[in-house]
Amino acid sequence: MEKDSGEKKYEYLADDPNGKVMPIMLSLIIGAFFAILNETLLNIALTTLMNEFNITVTTVQWMATGFMLVMGIVIPMSAVLLQWFTTRQMFLGTMSVFTIGTVVCSIAPTFPLLLAGRVLQAIGTGLLIPIIFNTFLLIFPPRRRGAVMGIVGLVIMFAPAIGPTLSGVIVQHLGWRYLFITVIPFALFSIVFAYKYLINVSEVTKPKIDVLSIIYSTIGFGGVVFGFSSAGGSEEGFLSPKAYVPIFIGIIALLLFSLRQFKLKDPLLDLRVFKYPMYTLGVVMFIIIIMAMFASEIILPIYMQGPLALTAATAGLVLLPGSLLNGLLSPVMGKLFDKVGPRKLMIPASFLLCGTMFIMTGLDMNTPVWIIVVSYVLLMISVSAIMMPVETNGLNQLPKRLYPHGTAVMTTLQPVAGAIGVSAFISMMNAKKNSVLAGAETPGDPLTISKAMVAGVELVYYVALGFTVLALIVSFYVYRAEPKEEVK
């Protein structure tokens, strides 16, 4: 790692006693926390927005899935952008875009303008995550990355996890616009702090940008996310042309995109990262964990505000203990990963995750609130023990040249998996609900509607249980990864 003086003494800046690591970490973490917080900040406020702008659930769903759609489009470009611009330029630019989007959302008089601001937020958030991962991989050696990535996990998992809790309290007592107003001063502080302290740690090589790859990527990731999002908001589900046509086009575009990447000298996303087994297994488990977490963060508030008739603030508070514990445990799990490796964390945590999903299959109209609290706590404990350790372990096996591509692939899959998970689970829940109502004698009765929704929630968690069993199987094949020479 080159120091400011140009003297090459340490391979990693964190090993240099005089290295300015802490200001760099703070600069990235402060901004990223409030940017990533917005991923789930609006989950509980969706009903409020429907009433405010007189829109349907299908329309308001785009505040969540549209955010992930844009992230899925911009993140694949991060690998190239990280090689075209310095760390400082990338961070200040993306935080500025995010802040502008937040201001637009806070003053938006119409839903289209609110959605436009949300798009700007998604662009900033989508590019921030790869910046953080790539920077920390360059600063810290493999033996210390678990603890550091645990701190990053505190941001990446704790911020969206606590979003529903904050949202419920803010919406009930201040109004939905304050979801954005309260973020603005922190975003501005992050920009000023980074302007003063953030230095560049990456190498600017300016590789050739392949326009056709960008087109394939945009159509591919955008089509898949759009199709699944449309399925989640349609009565016909995946039988709707608005769902299966974009998904089909997206899959074809992704296939063309993947084939092209292997032919390019400077690929937009170097898919050779999948030649490293621990990285590939890490991606599989990462996707499953994202889907399980996002499903609960969307389905549980709907269930609590529907059949259980809880207020938005109460529903948010029910999730608070799990959210807090998730954030607190992430650095602890990171240190344990450095000490004992991935297997001793992931195998027990996967068993716990399966057990938690099984408990949630039994949710009904008479479920005590404390069972939901405990279940969500167990879910978040297992997530903290799996998500960041498996991601760090996979990235550790890559050579340095592939760091931007490895982080870009993982962070691209996060919103894509989230959108697919949310849309698929909502579609399943609605389909089961409608099926039950179709066979009911009094489909318009509130009690019948609640029972139908409970049946839908049960189905979602049975499907989620199946995915977590797959994660358990995969966990037995994980071992501690060491950096390898590049695989041709």
Image (cartoon, rainbow, N blue to C red):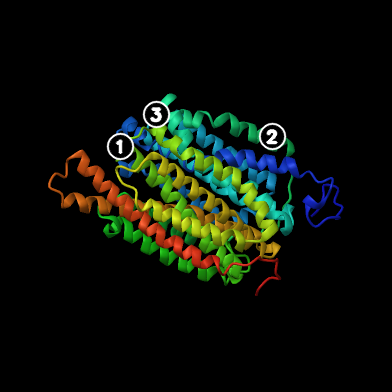
Q: Residue at x 45, y 58 (%)?
A: 354
Amino acid type, callout 2: Phe
Determine whether, in the image, residue 449 is placed left or right of residue 407. Answer: left
Q: Distance between the residues labelled 2 and 3?
A: 31 Å
Between 186 and 442, the one nearer to me in the picture: 442
Q: Position of residue 418 (x, y in %)?
A: 45, 52
For disc 1, the neighbor class at 10 Å (few under 14, some 14 to 19, many from 20) is few
Q: Do the residues labelled 2 and 3 touch (CB within 8 Å)?
A: no
In depth, the one of 259 and 32 nearer the eye is 32
Upstream in the sequence, badge 2 or badge 1?
1
Return the disc, 2 or 3, that comes first in the chain's sequence: 3
Which dot, 3 or 1, sits closer to the camera? Answer: 1
Secondary structure state at the residue bearing disc 2: helix
Element at label 3: loop
For the image, the number of numbered tags is 3
Residue tagged 3: 109
Corner quadrant of residue 406? bottom right
Alpha-carbon distance for marks 3 and 1?
A: 14 Å
The 10 Å Cα crowd at callout 2, few under 14, some 14 to 19, many 20 or more, is some
| Separation of marks 2 and 1 at Cα, in angstroms | 39 Å
Q: Which mark is drawn over residue 55?
A: 1
Which mark lies nearer to you, 2 or 3? 2
Q: In which quarter of the image is the N terminus?
A: bottom right
Q: Which residue is drawn at 29% across and 33% down?
A: 54
Q: Determine if residue 203 is in view.
A: no
Dot 3 amino acid type: Pro
* Residue found at the far top of this picture: 174
Picture coordinates of residue 64, whole percent (x, y): 42, 44
Q: Do the residues labelled 2 and 1 touch (CB within 8 Å)?
A: no
Check disc 2 and report the residue beneath it. 193
The three-letter amino acid code for the residue at tag 1 is Ile
